[in-house]
Image: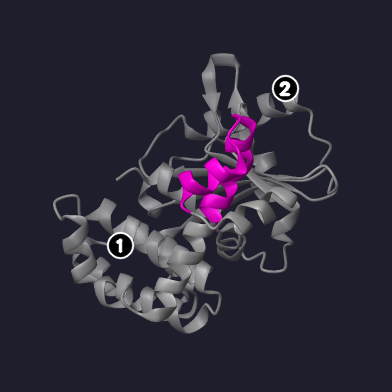
């Protein structure tokens, strides 16, 4: 399973899950953007960085690495990448943390003593198989746990998370996005199943038939179409042509143009 891509999407779409995972629940997630900067020298690339926006220069940087295999050169690589990042990007933020997310403790390499001065103030390590009861209490942590759950338990955990999402998420669009993301993780975990078989396993075919889900789907589809209006306008299409192309009411397109 492409775990790096999955975690990048989780933290990009739902940054609150990351800060919940590291125990920083009071963090203002609107102060951050999640990026994957490339370090030019030797083509280093960090898995991701929660980089504070310009108007929040005093917030800490969070360098995020997902490590699901043992690599004895890992700590050399991550600290080298971080310091090259500092050299190339010159961030103004005074504080920083290296957040390493392991699937299990046995995949952690030996920590080099030469970096011991960085260990306590800057390095934070998390082991997904040791999250324990937090999964039952937290939707966000449960979604992260689902990525590494064994196949024989993943289906039941996914159903629990779907029920929790339907109970806790009152915003229909967010609920729909979370449900679709849970489904995507399960599709990755069961590559031999078709999407229809995954839907049946998770009872998503029943959920998609509900009025709330349909309304959320229509609202999400509308928002996607409205984002296309300025692009089509720049390409020279008239308001009438845009309305016809996107199958929208003419007044809806006019209102989008005015905004």
Task: Name the spot of residue 121 as percent of width and height, x first.
Answer: 71, 49
Task: Name the spot of residue 75 as percent of width and height, x first.
Answer: 53, 35
Q: Are marks 2 and 1 in contact (CB under 8 Å)?
A: no
In this rendering, does residue 221 appear at all? yes
Q: Which residues are magenta?
A: 223-247
Residue under numbered circle 2: 88
Residue under numbered circle 1: 149
Task: Name the spot of residue 124 as percent of width and height, x first.
Answer: 60, 52
In this rendering, does residue 133 appear at all? no
Residue 17 drawn in magenta? no
Work out which residue is located at the far left of the displayed protein and give it.
192
Task: Name the spot of residue 42 as percent of width and height, x first.
Answer: 54, 15
The rendered magenta stretch, by its main secondary structure, is classed as: helix
**Does dot 1 land on a helix, a strand or a loop?**
loop
Give the colouring mode of the picture.
one colour
Residue 228 drawn in magenta? yes
Mark 2 or mark 1: which comes first in sequence?
2
Tell me the crowding category of disc 2: few under 14, some 14 to 19, or many 20 or more residues within 10 angstroms, Cα based.
few
**Residue at 37 percent of width and 75 percent of height:** 162
Is 1 on the left-hand or right-hand side of 143?
left
**In the foreground, 76 or 189:** 189
The picture quadrant where one finds residue 147 is bottom left
The picture quadrant where one finds residue 252 is bottom right
Could you tell me how many numbered marks the image carries? Answer: 2
For residue 69, above or below residue 207: above
Is 203 on the left-hand or right-hand side of 53?
left
**Does dot 2 land on a helix, a strand or a loop?**
helix
For the residues marked 2 and 1, what is the alpha-carbon distance in whole angstroms?
38 Å
**In the foreground, 56 or 210:** 210
């Amino acid at each position: 399973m492409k775990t790096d891509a999955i975690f990048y999407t989780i933290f990009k779409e739902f940054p609150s899950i990351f800060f919940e995972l590291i125990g920083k629940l009071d963090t203002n997630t609107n102060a951050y953007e999640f990026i994957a900067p490339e370090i030019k020298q030797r083509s280093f690339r960090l898995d991701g960085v929660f980089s504070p926006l310009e108007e929040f220069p005093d917030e800490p940087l969070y360098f995020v690495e997902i490590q699901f295999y043992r690599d004895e050169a890992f700590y050399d690589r991550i600290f080298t990448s971080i310091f090259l990042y500092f050299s190339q990007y010159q961030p103004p933020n005074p504080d920083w943390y290296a957040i390493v997310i392991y699937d299990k403790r046995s995949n952690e390499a030996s920590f080099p003593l030469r970096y011991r001065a960085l260990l306590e103030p800057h390095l934070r390590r998390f082991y997904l198989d040791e999250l324990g009861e937090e999964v039952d209490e937290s939707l966000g942590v449960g979604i992260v746990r689902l990525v590494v759950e064994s196949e024989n338990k993943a289906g039941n955990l996914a159903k629990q998370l779907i029920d929790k999402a339907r109970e806790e998420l009152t915003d229909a669009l967010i609920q729909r996005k979370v449900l679709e993301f849970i489904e995507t993780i399960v599709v990755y975990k069961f590559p031999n199943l078709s999407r229809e078989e995954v839907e049946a396993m998770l009872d998503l075919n029943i959920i998609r038939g509900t009025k709330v889900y349909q309304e959320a789907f229509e609202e999400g589809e509308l928002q996607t179409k409205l984002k296309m209006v300025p692009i089509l306008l720049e390409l020279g299409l008239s308001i009438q042509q845009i309305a016809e192309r996107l199958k929208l009411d003419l007044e809806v397109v006019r209102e989008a143009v005015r905004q």
